[in-house]
Amino acid sequence: MHVPPGTAAPSTVTKGLRVRVGEHQVVGHPVGHFLDVACLDAAAVTTFAAVAAEIAHAAGSLEGADRAAAAGDVLDRWKWFWEVDSSRLTDSEALGLFAELWFLVRWVGVMPAHVDAWTASEGSRHDFQWPHASVEVKATARGGDAGSVHTIRSLDQLADPETGELYLFSLRVVRDQLANNTLPKLVERVSTNLADHPAARERFLQKVGRRGYSPIHRKTHEIPYRVVEEGLYRVSDDFPRLTRDNFPAGLPDAVVRVSYGLDMAACGPWLISSNPMGWSPDGVHS
């Protein structure tokens, strides 16, 4: 990509990627300065091809130093996806990520504080954590009249947070080719909404990358979902759940973990809302 003399190469710390400005000559033209982006890791060639295509799309119509700036923006967006192993993001895990981003976009709003509250399941007990409220997000793609039954995978998943109240967000979707809700579209929407907050945007992209999401495999996750049911439930002391408090003497010998199914049809008394109106993570709800 041709750039003016004296243009500085965008900085990158991505392993296996080299970016520099060098002199080259195209047949029939004088020697000029070009931005060179080279892949040094054969295992990343597929990802590199996607990065190169996006650079060409973003910078191809620009002039002068703007080209290098646009290329730098693309490289910055991709740095968290460069070494992502997308094969580890199963359909079930992709649905879970979809539900968490749906909750972020629709129920709490995309802003830096809420992106920071999203733990992205990185070793935290609950998916969202604020001082006054924590939220565990569950999703199912059961169709028909099956209703929402969620798997609670451990005794800690619905345990009380250190501070504030605990809520369970339940989302039921079905695959529908006419629907417009997909995981890649949610990722793009959050990223776009954070355009004026580059640090928060970077933290968000880092989180989705660590979950195994990468734009290079977006077609794999472009499953259109129609939302059938969504609801926020307050997990109070009498909510139907199992925690370590149910086993004061500890688990029986040879039992190393406990998981169970939770039928949301029986959880109506604890339903706070079926839409985001009237609830906020600051503890305000009607």
Image: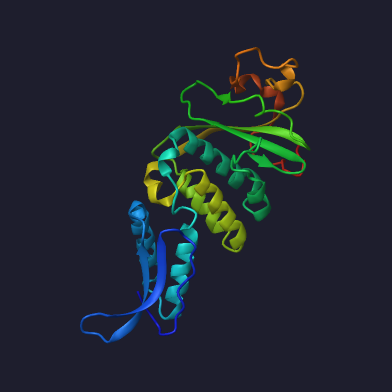
Front-lying residue, 1 or 179? 1
Q: Position of residue 217 (x, y in %)?
A: 39, 47
Task: Give the image quarter of residue 286.
Answer: top right
Task: Give the image quarter of residue 20.
Answer: bottom left
Q: Can the viewer see residue 276 in this picture?
A: no
Q: Quadrant of the N terminus?
A: bottom left
Residue at screen point 36% across, 60% down: 40
Instruction: Count the numbered circles shown.
Output: 0
Residue at screen point 27% across, 87% down: 30
- Colour mapping used in the image: rainbow
Q: Is residue 214 above or below residue 245?
A: below
- In the displayed image of the protein, which residue is found farthest to the left? 28
Front-lying residue, 220 or 110? 220
Q: Position of residue 14 (x, y in %)?
A: 46, 60
Q: Position of residue 152 (x, y in %)?
A: 60, 25
Drawn side of residue 103 relative to residue 76, left or right: right
Q: Position of residue 218 (x, y in %)?
A: 40, 47
Front-lying residue, 117 or 190? 117
Drawn side of residue 263 relative to residue 86, left or right: right
- In the displayed image of the protein, which residue is found farthest to the bottom? 30
Residue at screen point 75% across, 26% down: 236
Drawn side of residue 2 relative to residue 158, left or right: left
Q: Is residue 261 above or below residue 67?
A: above
Q: Is residue 90 above or below residue 75?
A: above
Q: Is residue 243 above or below residue 223?
A: above
Q: Can the viewer see residue 137 in this picture?
A: yes
